[in-house]
Image (cartoon, grey):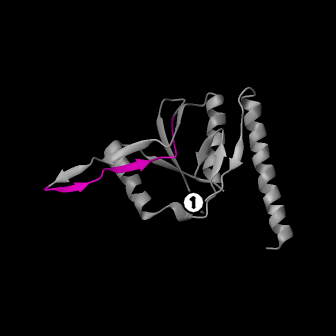
Amino acid sequence: MTPEEFQAAQDRISASWSARVERARAIDPGKETKVTKTAGKRNLYGAQKVEIDGIKFDSQAEGKRYVQLKALETAGEIVDLRIQVEFQILPAQDKFGKKERPVKYVCDFSYRDRNGVHVVEDVKSAPTKTREYIIKRKLMLFFHGIIVQEVMMS
């Protein structure tokens, strides 16, 4: 990729984020909406952290989904939107002097749809669909009866 192509790609991304911020502002004009990319160590999967409305997200895709869900909440389509909700799959154990930490699953988003159904979402890409995630997703269904919805963002 040439420097000119790289700059053009950066400009497209910046314009896309600006458009999303403007849409969010149009939905809730009184609320301050701020989007910033946070600098720091590179993510294992190449994701860039992003901050929206003072909330730090692990990836731009997760940030985009937050903007979509916030718009749905404002429109009354969903309620009780929560971020990074922790579920305990197995409790901590102490057997025969051997201590084991609890097994937990942290979802990206949790909310109730307009029918009152509890929805748990995780923003995924092919590299982030790890074996550990798949096992925890199955354990969530088995122990809590919750089907984790995977949202694939581009």
Q: Residue furthest right?
A: 4
- Image label count: 1
Mark 1, residue position: 125
Image coordinates for residue 104, horizontal then vertical, percent? 37, 49
Considering only vertical position in the picture, is 3 above or below 151? below
Q: Is residue 108 magenta?
A: yes
SS majority, magenta = strand
Quarter of the image for residue 153 reads bottom right
Image point 57% across, 62% down: which residue? 43
Considering only vertical position in the picture, is 71 above or below 93? above
Q: Residue furthest front?
A: 40
Considering only vertical position in the picture, is 144 above or below 101? above
Q: Would residue 5 be found to the left or right of residue 38 on screen?
A: right
Q: Would residue 82 be found to the left or right of residue 3 on screen?
A: left
Front residue of 27/149: it is 27
Q: Secondary structure at mark 1?
A: loop
Considering only vertical position in the picture, is 53 above or below 46? above
Front residue of 12/30: it is 30
Q: Would residue 124 be found to the left or right of residue 39 on screen?
A: left
Quarter of the image for residue 125 reads bottom right
Q: Is residue 30 magenta?
A: no
Q: Residue furthest left?
A: 96
Image point 75% across, 48% down: which residue? 17
Image coordinates for residue 147, horizontal then vertical, percent? 43, 46
Q: Give the residues drawn in magenta, as a range.
A: 96-111
